[in-house]
Image (cartoon, rainbow, N blue to C red):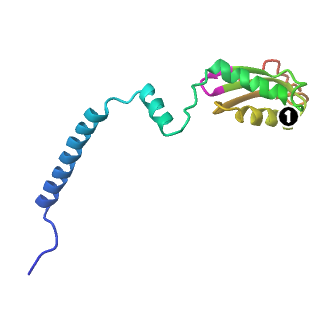
Amino acid sequence: MRRDELSGTQIFLWTTLGMGTGLVAGFALSEWVGGVNRTRFRRAARRLGHTVPARVTPAASARAVDAAIQAEPRLARFAIEVTAVSRGTVELRGWVTDRGSRTLAARVARAVAGVDSVINSILVRGEDDSHSGGTRVTDQSA
């Protein structure tokens, strides 16, 4: 009778052999290829015909979002302040007349290349400045 099952020892030996072969191949490949850094990555991407986007600074993102908001006719009349929080994140502050404008401003900001996250601190006149509980909202900080 022939057994088709592997014993625990055989499984261990084959696993050890596979892992050892993988490690040796990995070390050999890293010696042959060398370290990967930003310069080598860009060079390889150019050879393949791809463009690697430049890293966008937080200030550049804020300027781009501000320009996009000013270019939108429905938002240009509002004084919306755009602040860079970190790379890929901007904060919007200001007052608008309706919730639709608030939502539109966030959508326009998110559509800007390099912006991953938008903190929407825009307040709506008539809703966020009304008296509720004796407290009046005058600061728009989040």
Q: Which residue is mark 1?
A: 101
- Provide the secondary structure element on which disc 1 rests: helix
Q: Is residue 80 visible?
A: yes
Q: Tell me the kind of residue under disc 1.
A: Ser
Q: Please provide the residue range marked out in magenta.
A: 84-89
Vertically, is 61 above or below 17? above
* x and y, in percent, of residue 48 in the image: 49, 40
Whether 86 is among the magenta residues is yes
Vertically, is 63 above or below 29? above
Q: Is residue 133 visible?
A: no
Check the picture and name the quadrant holding the C terminus: top right
Q: Please name the residue shown 27% across and 35% down the image.
A: 32
Q: In the figure, residue 31 lies in which quadrant?
A: top left
Vertically, is 100 above or below 88? below
**Dot 1 alpha-carbon crowd within 10 angstroms: few under 14, some 14 to 19, many 20 or more:** some
Q: Please name the residue shown 23% across and 38% down the image.
A: 28
